[in-house]
Image: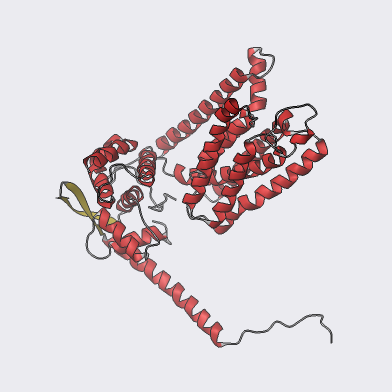
Amino acid sequence: MDTPLREPTFLILTALAGEPLHGYAIIGEVTTLSQGRLSLRPGTLYGALDRLVDAGMVEVHRVEVVDGRLRRYYRLSPAGDTTLSEETDRLRRNVEAATARLRDRSRSPRAVPRTVGGVA
Amino acid sequence: MRDLERRYRRLLHAYPLGYRRARGAEIVGTYLDLAEPGRRWPSPADAIDVVTGGVRERLRAAGAADLIPGVRLAATLAFTTATALAGIWTAAETTAGQVPWVVPTFGPFATTGIIVWTVWLLAAVVRCLAPIRWTRMTIGLALLLSAAALPVGALAGLPRPPLFVLVPQATLGLLALAMPADPPRWHRLVPLVVAPLATLAAAHGMVERNTPYRSGEWGNFLPRAGVALLLTAMLTAAILALRHDTRGLWALLTLLPPIGLLGLYPLSEITADLVGASYPDFQVATATAGIVVILSAVTLTAAVAARRGARPARAGTVTAAPTAGACPTCGR
């Protein structure tokens, strides 16, 4: 699977980093993780899950029927775990680099550009 | 809830049969979990989601999953072309006063098309400022107004743009609905830059030539716009192909119907010559449009079949038709 992961993919994998979840729970977790910015719809979610299963990053854990509704639980596979860890490290390094630059900038006074060709 | 479940199951026919049998209960269950109590009909957004998911799954099953990003690229090019044309027709609408003979007008404008073109230009602004659903709603409104121009024109005796103008615009609009939600910022800005430039260039050209909108000015612009779109799509396909990216080729194939319909008038003239008609009348133009759409569909189907033959789909763990190395959410 290509990296960097797109945000919805990253959040689906993050949602599954804990206990196995069914589709409805994954949608809720992704909404929570994104602080309400991202609201997956089932059509999009199951398309993504199918591709993640095909890529070997997610696997089906178990199937249950609750209140007459079929629920398939998904969990992160070892390969998915590795990809999510590597992607998280990459993002962390980027955040640390950006934070350091911003901190340095706020400490040093901003250089005033010299006027070229002004009145001597 | 039973009604709602039945209606979701009916919508689920957008998915291939095998997939529906394997996953239908799970998907419908999730929609029902998300539905608020008392709801009896799927929301429009859910209905679009089910149908889009079904089409995506059918394409994956056909081994043509990379058609989806190609369609998204084609949608972006179609939207830019449509807004540029809307700018050109806005300029053309103001040349009503130049018509040397007395024809009905729509106030200071040539036809009721000014309303449609204004909504199209508004869509270019909305694209820059608002989420994709607002752009889609604005395009949908433009499509509705385009369709309404025909009966309103007939009933109220108001002049409307020619079908040679409305039909390719509507085709571009339908394709533009598939635009991606989160493109790079400059993708959003392109239509907003291109549309005013097209308006100014068209207004300047029309004043110079003194040829008004309703006496055939559209005949000059449409084939040129078709050629420009074709060349842009071919150039994009060639550049992306150098990077081993097939999106551009799929985009080119997807754009064939609007490109053909932009050239409908010269193509209808050829058909008229072939069938011995003195000019491309309504029947000749309709038949030509039908041939354009059928040939485009056959070309795209043949390309998908060739792709399937080159890369047979394999069975996945949960379902079928994987896309190795692609983004799970968008297929890219």
Q: Position of residue B42 (x, y in %)?
A: 32, 43
| Relative vertical location of residue B259 with respect to residue B183 in this rendering, above or below | above
Please tell me which residue lies in front, B18 or B244: B18
Q: Is residue B22 left or right of residue B159?
A: left
Residue shown at 70% from the left, 32% from the top: B105
Residue shown at 84% from the left, 87% from the top: A120
Q: Position of residue A33 (x, y in %)?
A: 34, 65
Q: Is residue A35 left or right of residue B110?
A: left
Q: Position of residue A60 (x, y in %)?
A: 22, 53
Q: Residue furthest right?
A: A120
Taking the image as drawn, is residue A65 in sight?
yes
Location of the N terminus of chain B by quadrant is: top left
Please tell me which residue lies in front, B54 or B83: B83
| Relative vertical location of residue A29 with respect to residue B214 in this rendering, above or below | below
Residue shown at 67% from the left, 21% from the top: B269
Colour pattern: secondary structure
Please tell me which residue lies in front, B140 or A79: B140
Q: Position of residue B28 (x, y in %)?
A: 26, 44
The quarter of the displayed image where residue B220 is located: top right
